[in-house]
């Protein structure tokens, strides 16, 4: 049997990107955290105004990516701080939604200062003059479950040692207590590790989370058994997403993460009412035909 269902985490309309049903770590983590949150973001596609913390995170990621374009000797904390304003102007030109964050599009000095402070946290745990990243902001993608599920995501940084060992690095810039998001962060890194293992045949040696606010690095070493189990988990998750979509049944799952949810006003757990479930066939490109779960 086939039914029309929404794609899970597929980035539709993105130039140069394959438009097949795919799962990203963010959307997979959304469904795990709260199925209704997944629906709001992926199926209803409700807009979310970036928060101060999210905008600052985008800015810091942009600076760290640009930093490695500089000759190694120039990758200093002063150079990084000097890139902050330039990168913010570039982001404002590229991402319209950021312009509404501050009056007349001008960030308060506090915003730029806090971004520089996070960069200081980065330099406290790594010396970029001694690093030569193999890739930055790189798209990684693979198929699992005999091609029935495509996994895709963007890795902040990938380091490859002369011996061929992979280190996946993810920068965490959030202002919230990191304990609230730690499980989600590790889930994301395992997701990348699985994709890299499947595409390159090598299990990454290290998964590194860099918490810039705390100036702390957390390293984790995955193994084949764990990634094999993780792959099964993702396949089961995808089946659950397909079933929820076919049944139009995405339930709220309140947790402490509700404090960071932009959609509380529409959530039954907070006396809200979700919008009617969209007719996916009326949203160009958002409905696809897949095998329905049993
Ligand atoms: S408020 Fe909480 S329960 Fe409701 S949709 Fe958001 S994350 Fe889910």
Image: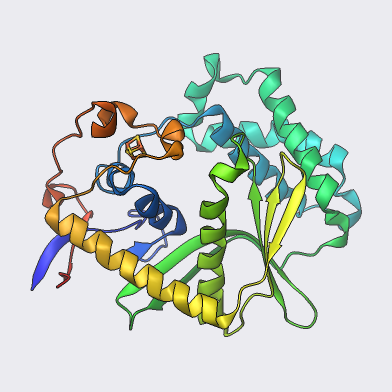
Q: Residue furthest top?
A: 103
**Residue 257 drawn above or below residue 2:** above
Residue 199 is at least partly visible in this image: no
> How far across and down, in percent of the image, does residue 66 sit?
71, 49
Residue 261 is at least partly visible in this image: yes
Pick the front one: 221 or 50: 221
The residue under the point 15% across, 51% down is 248
Question: Colour scheme of this structure image?
Answer: rainbow
Pick the front one: 184 or 275: 184
**Residue 35 drawn above or below residue 235:** above
Residue 124 as seen in the image, left or right of residue 193: right
Name the quadrant of the C terminus. bottom left
Name the quadrant of the N terminus. bottom left
The residue under the point 63% across, 38% down is 59
Pick the front one: 259 or 242: 259
Q: Quadrant of residue 273?
A: top left
Residue 95 as seen in the image, left or right of residue 8: right
> How far across and down, in percent of the image, does residue 69 sit?
76, 54
Q: Quadrant of residue 84?
A: top right
**Residue 152 drawn above or below residue 93:** below
The residue under the point 53% across, 76% down is 226
> How far across and down, in percent of the image, does residue 230 sit?
46, 72
Ligand 1: which quarter? Answer: top left
> How far across and down, in percent of the image, does residue 113 sit?
74, 26
Q: Quadrant of residue 269?
A: top left
Residue 151 as seen in the image, left or right of residue 283: right
The residue under the point 51% across, 25% down is 99
């Amino acid at each position: 049997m086939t039914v029309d269902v929404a794609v899970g985490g597929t980035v539709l309309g993105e130039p140069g990107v394959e438009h097949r049903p795919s799962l990203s770590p963010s959307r997979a983590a959304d469904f795990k955290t709260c199925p209704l949150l997944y629906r709001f973001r992926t199926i209803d596609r409700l807009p979310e105004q970036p928060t101060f913390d999210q905008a600052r995170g985008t800015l810091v990621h942009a600076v760290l990516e640009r930093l490695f374009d500089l000759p190694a000797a120039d990758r200093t904390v002063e150079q990084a701080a000097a890139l902050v304003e330039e990168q913010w102007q570039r982001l404002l030109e590229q991402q319209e939604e950021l312009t509404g964050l501050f009056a007349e599009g001008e960030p308060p000095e506090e915003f730029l200062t806090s971004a520089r402070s996070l960069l200081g946290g980065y330099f406290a745990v790594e010396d970029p003059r001694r690093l030569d990243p193999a890739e930055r902001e790189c798209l990684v993608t693979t198929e699992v479950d005999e091609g029935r599920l495509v996994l895709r995501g963007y890795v902040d940084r990938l380091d490859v040692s002369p011996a061929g060992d992979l280190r996946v690095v993810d920068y965490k810039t959030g202002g919230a207590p990191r304990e609230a998001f730690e499980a989600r962060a590790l889930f994301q890194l395992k997701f990348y590790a699985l994709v890299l293992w499947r595409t390159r045949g090598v299990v990454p040696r290290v998964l590194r989370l860099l918490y810039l606010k705390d100036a702390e690095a957390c390293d984790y070493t995955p193994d084949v058994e764990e990634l094999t189990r993780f792959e099964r988990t993702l396949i089961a998750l995808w089946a659950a997403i397909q079933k929820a979509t076919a049944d139009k049944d995405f339930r709220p799952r309140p947790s402490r993460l509700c404090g960071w949810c932009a959609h509380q006003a529409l959530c039954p757990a907070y006396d809200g009412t979700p919008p009617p479930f969209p007719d996916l066939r009326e949203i160009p490109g958002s409905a696809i035909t897949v095998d329905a779960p049993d």
